[in-house]
Image (cartoon, rainbow, N blue to C red):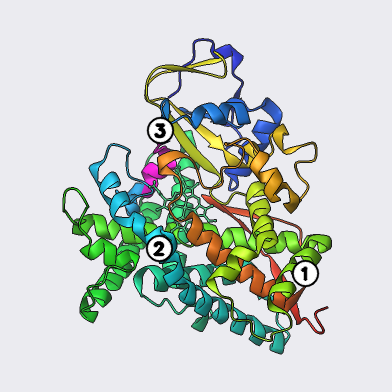
Amino acid sequence: MTRSADRTAIPVADMTRDGLGTRPLQRTMDLAREHGPLFVRRYGERDALFACSLDLVTELADEERFAKAVGPALEHVREFAGDGLFTAYNDEPNWAKAHDILLPAFAMGSLRTYHPTMLRVARRLIASWDAALADGRPVEVAEDMTRMTLDTIGLAGFGYDFGSFGRDEEHPFVAAMVRCLAHTQGLLARRPDDGLDHPAQDAAFRADADYLAGVVDEVIDARRASGETGTDDLLGLMLQAPHRVSGETLDPANIRNQVITFLIAGHETTSGALSFALYHLLKNPAVLRRARDEVDALWGDAADPEPAFEDVGRLTYVRQVLCEALRLWPTAAVFGRTARADTELGGGRLTMRAGDTAFVLTPMLHRDPVWGDNVELFDPDRFAPEREAALPPHAFKPFGTGERACIGRQFALHEAVMLLGLLIHRYRFLDHTGYQLLIRETLTFKPEGFTLELARRTERA
Ligand code: HEM
């Protein structure tokens, strides 16, 4: 834990008595509002240092001084994702090995090969929304976005079809994953006076983790049984590709961890980002109108547009909408940075020893004064090219930072911008419940209970 030369200068918010609740990150955002951008959140024996201002994050982003921290939350995720890329320690040889082997799967050429699959799955969602519209049913936004992103990573990355739109309920993989993530969050929030044994919860978690591993084995077995030996998707690279220097391939235990990691990291955050973007479009008619103008200029009144790969790059305003949604609600809201050597943070306000960790609370970084006076306002023009170019380098960090930043960023943006564009082009969104944003946390953020009624756009109205 972080020690300080002058600890009195750093506010300590003691949450031991009140607990962290079921929305701990939103609670922590309130603490930042109350105590300022550098504070310690105390919970029983556990102190966590949070840093949220642009200046502090700029320091923490310095790769010479800091590296990714696998904090307590990720330590728990390691129980089911092991040394997969997301949860690997920096010095674990499997991180660099897997990073090098898997990077080609995220190069521009690979994205191009995923495009038809992304479009195919986007059309599944559209078919399901058309059916809901025909029946006069509202759609459940976050649930359907999760169906879409899970099927996309399953098919594009692993050639495996979760068939989520053929099911009334979410795929059991999603249910088990959400329970595992919620369990992880619950472990962090266990009250210090709680006692140590929670055998029923822990057994249920183990059963879920085993189930996830079982699905992964199925995915791998299906590929092996197909006899395919190509390396043009993630699974192909995992199973076949040798490291460019050592010539080694990934070992079977690591492959399992990588598959589980990518199935989770590859869909959970993107679906939240899409859901928040739709929420903000619903509540901001002027923004929606501009986004419509953009998609209409591209696809006219085609009943079923056939977006080319390049079209997605042309949806610049839709991309701005998505970025602005990720500014207000970065769906992976925290990342940890650990000091490589003893160092001072915040102009000497705090001494960190080698190995000490500070957590960046990204939604508060994204409300730093650098964003202007009205940081709560949803304004995609913040990401207009000339304004985005003028932003300080570390002001916008929804994908983390440095060499451990998100490997799937372009994948997520391509998938999400294309789907948003298609939905904006096709539907009018009706706020049939007067929805008030409520955010569910299972380590990630998602709007909870968000439903939409749909109408087809007529005459481009
Ligand atoms: C890492 C966010 C989509 C795979 C990260 C990190 C963040 C993040 C913040 C860094 C975590 C840390 O420093 O502890 C997001 C968001 C996404 C998204 C907001 C969508 C909007 C994806 C997709 C994939 C993916 C689509 C895969 C197809 C990964 C992996 C890592 C990672 C494997 C670990 C990279 C490493 O440490 O080498 N992501 N992500 N993510 N992300 Fe994403």
* Amino acid type shown at disc 1: Asp
Q: Nearer the viewer, mark 2 or mark 3?
A: 3
**Of label 2 and label 3, which has the lower sequence position?**
3
Residue 149, compared with residue 47, is above or below; it is: below
Of the pair 398 and 263, the residue shown nearer to us: 398
Nearer to us of marks 2 and 1 is 1
164 sits to left or right of 446: left
- Label 3 C-beta lies within 8 Å of the nearest ligand 1 atom: no
* Disc 2 residue: CB within 8 Å of ligand 1: no
Check the image and report above or below for 457 versus 15. Answer: below
The residues colored magenta run 69-77
What is the tally of numbered marks visible in this picture?
Answer: 3
Is 140 in the magenta? no
Residue 440 position within the rendered picture, expressed as x and y whole percent measured from the top left:
61, 55
Residue drawn at (74%, 74%) of the image: 296
Please tell me which of labels 2 and 1 falls first in the chain.
2
State the quadrant of the C terminus.
Answer: bottom right
Q: In the image, residue 428 lies at what x, y percent?
A: 77, 75
Image position of 225 (left or right of 441): left
